[in-house]
Amino acid sequence: MEFIKPGRQFDFMGKRWLFIGLSALLLLASIVTFFKPGPHLGTDFKGGTELEVAFLKATEAGDVRAAVESLGFEAPDVIRVKDSGAEDTHRYLIRVQEVSALGEDQKEAIRQKLCSLPEGTAPSADFEARCPANVRASEVKFSPGGDKVTMRYEVEPDLAAIRAQLTGIPGVELRTGENNPVVVSARDHKVEAQLKSRGDQLLDGLRNKLGADRVPERALRVEWIGPKAGAQLRDAAIKSIAIAIVFIMAYIAFRFDLRFAPGGILALVHDVGIALGAMIITHREITLSTVAAMLTIVGYSITDTVVVYDRIRENLTKHRNMSFSSIINLSISEMLGRTIITSGVTSLSMVCFLVWGTGVIKDFAFALLIGILVGTYSSIYVAAPFTEWIDRRFFGGQATAQKKVTRTKAVKRADAVV
């Protein structure tokens, strides 16, 4: 299949300033979106608790948001989740910024109830009478999510008494079940108690506000991540993209020539920046899946750029009488049919995911679709023109000069033979 007839050429370089200006405007607009409205970071990066709930009856998003706010959660996100091809199950994604179910006051209250003395404090006679050794915790630790309390005792603990100690504390509620608390290490007299997490408390509150006939007993899934871990993930994501770009730059410089590397890197920054800007302007979440999409865009974009660069290098030795700009036009024209087929087929698959996919798949497909379109465009109007400018500005047109020198030497050798 041939979309472009062999031998046909297009003057891409003649219109490069028009498209370079367009690229600059798009990239500038993407940078502005990072400040206003700003990226909508997911729970992966900013921390928080996320529940996916399938309500038993038809429920409006406004009613769910109002119920969550009335429970004391600030600025909750309530997102309708639709599953293509399935009947409406009234599913919502509920995201709140709060992570731990326990505040410092509640943690101190638990320590006092468990008869845990500060280190170096000697127990009084009244304290020993009120708190025998089998309910006197020598160590109390809390999980980051506030849904687990670990205690250690000097003697074999009394689980029934410990359960009574943890009952009645405001804002603290044990999960239902016979084996709670439970001994996790008999040798160390270590006990673990499972508390209702922030997600459990949120679901219970929704059941009280909206009715048990509408809110299920359990959420489809509950996830949480602390703000510190989210910040670490965000930094690691930025580093991964930066490291990938650096190694790609080194590969291009080694594979082709130093003058080719800056154009390839500029195209990568251009593609990732515009793709992220499109995600922000359409109010899509920036999550770890988005980072995976950006790394995929980096790989796809550089592959297309390397194909163009390879044809340019081949034509540099084949057409010695042409200028560098003309060789770029020729090379891109020769690769245009292949680029249309490759990018078109890949884009069609992303469109299918975007139309019939669900949740994170849609966001991933959207980012890739934008990246494919912009990546194909940047190989033609960003990487190649910038490489020509680098050659002319910093290498004195060395690519063309080398061809002329080689041709002069060849003519002299021919004259000598004659």
Image: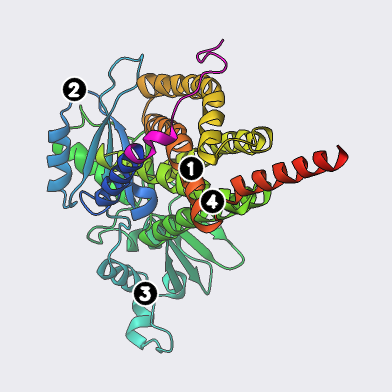
Question: What's the amino acid at mark 4?
Answer: Asp
Around disc 3, counting alpha carbons within 10 Å, would you say few (fewer than 14), some (14 to 19), or many (20 or more)? many
Residue at 37% across / 53% down in the picture? 45
Q: Is residue 17 magenta?
A: yes
Picture coordinates of residue 37, whole percent (x, y): 21, 48
Q: Is residue 16 magenta?
A: yes
Tell me which segment is drawn in magenta: 1-18
As drawn, the label of residue 115 is 3
Secondary structure under tag 1 reads: helix
Quadrant in the picture for residue 221: top left
Q: CA distance from mark 2 to mark 1?
A: 52 Å
Residue 391: which disc? 4
- Residue 107 pos. (x, y %): 32, 68
In the rendered image, the vertical position of residue 154 relative to residue 409, given as above or below:
below
Is label 2 in a helix, a strand or a loop?
Answer: loop
Give amino acid for label 3: Cys
Residue ID at (32%, 55%): 99
Sequence order check, earlier mark of 1 and 3: 3
Foreground of the two, 139 or 387: 387
C-alpha separation, residue under disc 1 versus residue under disc 3: 69 Å
Marks 4 and 2, Cα distance to the nearest angstrom?
A: 64 Å
Q: Nearer the viewer, residue 221 or 293?
A: 293
Closer to the camera, 291 or 23?
Answer: 23
